[in-house]
Image (cartoon, rainbow, N blue to C red):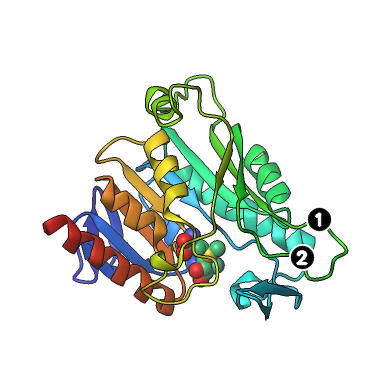
Amino acid sequence: MKNSEYKYGGVLMTKPYYCKDKSILVHADTFEFLSKMKSESMDMIFADPPYFLSNGGISNSGGKVVSVDKGDWDKVGSLEEKHEFNRKWIRLAKQVLKPNGSIWISGSFHNIYSVGMALEQEGFKILNNITWQKTNPAPNLSCRYFTHSTETILWARKNNKTARHYYNYDLMKELNDGKQMKDVWTGSLTKQSEKWAGKHPTQKPEYLLERIILASTQENDYILDPFVGSGTTGVVAKRLARRFIGIDSKKDYLKIAKARLEREIKQEDI
Ligand code: SAM
């Protein structure tokens, strides 16, 4: 093994941006990195890819008019380009997913139809279509549409007869007061108290990742987030004793993810 190489659970990688206590952050283009990872090595993938909604529009945040633009990484030239992007990363994700693993992908109407189509085209079977209903969505400033108050999270596994995905049915039922957990999950936008480490335009709330991880993985499982951003998946994976690899092409975001992971590890030590 060369000095610049690194092994993690059988996964050969270049030296990561951060690595501690079974949590790894990688600074890389996800397409490049996924194509180098060991095949069938991950138990679960959660991905919050670009929604491609940065079109120069406006929204509302804390009573102020703000741009909806998230950054250059959230812009795309055409419908075809958007779909090609989704097909390509989903194809690579399938290669690194174990035969009995599963994948969760979040999105809004801007990208989720492409994601769903790409999942089926690349040989996945969609297991659930989760609706995340936000209790405090931003109001619609134009007053020409209904208030956008939901996002979708698709859950899928490989589409073959032998694939057996893991679902912790009993725990989900217990968490829902003894009744079967439904596919509409209601809760607030990400709380300010979770945003202490810095600004990421699309930081996901921790409670969503907690449910996803508890539902579909067991302790010590390998979880991958190919668009890790501020590191929400990693923080919750750490809290729940899962192993984690997160990839992002922006160092500024990885800095936030690292600070959040460090705090999580420190709290564990107390
Ligand atoms: N779930 C994350 C969180 O809670 O903070 C937010 C993820 S955000 C929607 C998508 C992320 O993907 C951004 O941080 C962006 O920098 C990253 N990204 C976009 N294209 C990428 C690429 N080709 N390779 C690696 N990261 C990429």
| CB-based contact (under 8 Å), mark 2 and mark 1 | yes
Q: Earlier in the sequence, mark 2 or mark 1?
A: 2
Q: For residue 160, what is the image quadrant?
A: top right
Distance, label 2 to label 1, CA atoms, is 7 Å
Taking the image as shown, residue 25 lies to the left or right of residue 45, namely left
Query: How far across and down, in percent of the image, does residue 52 sit?
Result: 68, 65
Taking the image as shown, residue 182 lies to the left or right of residue 68, namely left
Please tell me whether residue 238 is drawn above or below residue 194 in the rendered image.
above
Q: Which residue: 47% across, 20% down?
A: 162
Q: Which residue: 27% across, 69% down?
A: 18
Pick the residue in front: 103 or 268: 268
Q: Amino acid at mark 2?
A: Asn
Please tell me whether residue 139 is drawn above or below residue 7 in the rendered image.
below
Quadrant of the drawing holding the N terminus: bottom left
Q: Is residue 46 visible?
A: yes
| Circle on res. 146 | 1
Q: Is residue 17 visible?
A: no
Query: How far across and down, in percent of the image, does residue 142 sit?
Result: 83, 70
